[in-house]
């Protein structure tokens, strides 16, 4: 296994350890370090960050952190908060949409519960002229996620109201892109953030990058309002060249990046006149998300250790 892959695997492993989560989230210095990637624990803090980013010409995706919910009341509570987020976006006239994780809304519990929570959020989005992205989680959830997405579309939610993420590292994604394009879906293309076995995903980073470029070329040509979600400078340059070559104007697609990651590149894209959206997560359940961000880049572990040396545990 490559070093980068091993690091990611290790942090995804840690992200699933609930006992470590309890210890880590009680620790003041880790909480402060996590603020680099997480807007805060409350909706108010997230709205402040969103307003700041909007003022810098960047649109926002708000995400209430939380995944793999084990109690129906937690799934329902998350759905209530998401509807509230949509209301705040509307009231404050923010350039913002929403991203949800289906395991947060009850995917592991029951189909009925998930449909209740998800449809409630999408109905609210449609009523307020808002928009929802469905994040893609570990590979065992992909089939169900795409199935639910198809169900939403069949229930009359258009691509403006609901879009879905697609992970380039999965072998199946070329087929899934085909399916999504036929459905007229709005797609956010990402590399993929979970630790997957070589039976389902490319183990080598170079192969993931190549797969991303293949999917990107097709998505840019055939997709509508597609989102190119990466901080990979080579891929971003390639996407800009392709858009020019295919004659696709900058208002037909957007770039998306994560809060706290490559802020220099984010500013550059806006300056060049491209549409940029920043994914802004918030909420008390930040531990798994933070662990995945640490595992994406060895330098982030150094950053965490430096803050430990500075502040002490
Ligand atoms: P890559 O990992 O090759 O990084 C390219 C460069 O970006 C690095 O060299 C570094 O400079 C910088 N960089 C990347 N990650 C960094 C980090 N954590 N800290 C500091 N610098 C970093 N995944 C998923 O499985 N399901 C999903 O639904 C989503 N949704 C999503 C939305 C948006 C808007 C983004 C940008 C990403 C996701 N992801 C995701 C995460 C995605 O799968 C991937 O893990 C990260 O984007 C990192 O990969 P890059 O494409 O940036 O490339």
Image (cartoon, grey):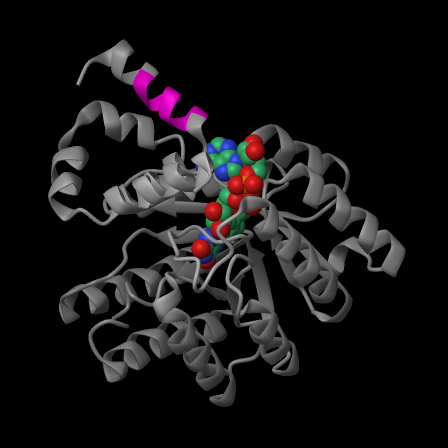
In the displayed structure, would residue 107 be above or below residue 297?
A: below
Image quadrant holding the N terminus, namely: top left
In the displayed structure, would residue 27 be above or below residue 238?
A: above
Residue 180 percent location from the top left of the image: 59, 76
Residue 141 percent location from the top left of the image: 36, 70
Residue 68 percent location from the top left of the image: 24, 61
Residue extent of the magenta highlight: 299-305
**Residue 283, visible in the rendered structure:** no
Residue in front for this viewpoint, 160 or 243: 243
**Which residue is drawn at the image coordinates 57% and 79% (left, top)?**
158
Image quadrant holding the C terminus, namely: top left
Residue 178 is left or right of residue 154, and the answer is right
**Which residue is drawn at the image coordinates 24% and 13% (left, top)?**
311
Task: Identify the main secondary structure in magenta.
Answer: helix
**Residue 304, visible in the rendered structure:** yes
Residue in front for this viewpoint, 15 or 90: 15
In the displayed structure, would residue 81 be above or below residue 8?
A: below
């Amino acid at each position: 296994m490559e070093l980068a892959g091993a690091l990611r695997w290790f942090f995804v492993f840690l992200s699933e350890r609930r006992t470590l989560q309890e210890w880590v989230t009680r620790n003041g210095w880790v909480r402060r370090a996590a603020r680099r990637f997480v807007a805060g624990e409350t909706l108010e803090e997230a709205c402040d960050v969103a307003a700041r980013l909007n003022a810098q010409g960047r649109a926002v995706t708000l995400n209430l952190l939380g995944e793999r919910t084990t109690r129906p009341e937690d799934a329902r509570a998350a759905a209530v908060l998401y509807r509230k987020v949509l209301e705040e976006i509307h009231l404050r006239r923010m350039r913002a949409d929403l991203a949800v994780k289906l395991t947060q809304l009850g995917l592991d519990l029951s189909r009925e519960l998930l449909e209740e929570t998800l449809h409630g959020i999408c109905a609210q989005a449609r009523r307020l002229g808002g928009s929802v992205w469905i994040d893609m989680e570990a590979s065992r959830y992909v089939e169900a996620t795409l199935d639910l997405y198809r169900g939403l579309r069949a229930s009359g939610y258009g691509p403006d109201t609901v879009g879905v993420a697609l992970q380039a590292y999965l072998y199946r994604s070329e087929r899934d892109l085909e399916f999504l394009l036929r459905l007229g879906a709005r797609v956010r293309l990402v590399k993929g953030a979970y630790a997957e076995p070589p039976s389902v995903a490319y183990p080598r980073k170079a192969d993931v990058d190549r797969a991303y470029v293949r999917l990107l070329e097709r998505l840019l040509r055939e997709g509508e309002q597609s989102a190119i979600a990466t901080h990979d400078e080579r891929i971003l340059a390639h996407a800009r060249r392709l858009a020019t070559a295919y004659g696709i104007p900058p208002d037909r697609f957007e770039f998306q990046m994560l809060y706290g990651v490559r802020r220099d590149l984010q500013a550059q894209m806006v300056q060049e006149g491209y549409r940029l959206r920043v994914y802004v997560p918030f909420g008390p359940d930040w531990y798994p998300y933070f662990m995945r961000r640490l595992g994406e880049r060895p330098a982030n572990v150094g950053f965490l250790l430096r803050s430990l040396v500075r502040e002490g545990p």
